[in-house]
Image (spheres, rainbow, N blue to C red):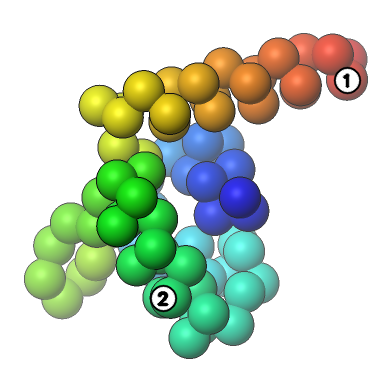
Amino acid sequence: MKILTILIKYGDMNITKLYRLSKIRYDKLKKELDELQRMKLVEILGDSKKIVRLNYSNPKVVILINLLEELVKDEL
């Protein structure tokens, strides 16, 4: 969930930046990204400089974005 929250907040980014922002061990981050990609929640683009982005064609991603926006709105 942390990875998805970061991508929703900051948008597309390379794996190195995601690693720094998430503070998740790199091996665990890669494993979680593989799982999120398998679930079609994220897409990983590029060969050498891999970019991670949300898969906006997946309705679950849109629902998650809307839910997080509502939660943040309620905190204000």
The residue at the point 50 percent across, 73 percent down is 29
Vertical side of 7 occupied by 52: above or below:
below
- Quadrant location of residue 71? top right
Q: Amino acid at mark 1?
A: Glu
* Drawn side of residue 56 relative to residue 60, left or right: left
Residue 61 lies, in percent from the top left, at 43, 30
The answer to the question of whether label 1 and label 2 lie on touching residues, with beta carbons closer than 8 A, is no
Residue 37 lies, in percent from the top left, at 31, 56
Nearest to the observer: residue 70 or residue 47: 70
Residue 34 lies, in percent from the top left, at 34, 67
Residues packed near mark 2 inside 10 Å, few (<14), some (14 to 19) or many (20 plus): some
Q: Is residue 20 visible?
A: yes
Determine whether the residue tagged by mark 2 lies in a helix, strand or loop: helix
Determine whether the residue tagged by mark 1 lies in a helix, strand or loop: helix
Residue under label 1: 75
Which residue ends up furthest to the front in the rendered image? 39
Q: Is residue 42 visible?
A: no
Residue 5 lies, in percent from the top left, at 59, 43
* Drawn side of residue 37 relative to residue 45, left or right: right
Nearest to the observer: residue 45 or residue 40: 40
Q: In 3D space, how far apart are the residues under numbered discs 1 and 2 (Cα atoms)?
A: 31 Å
Which mark is on residue 56? none
Residue under label 2: 30
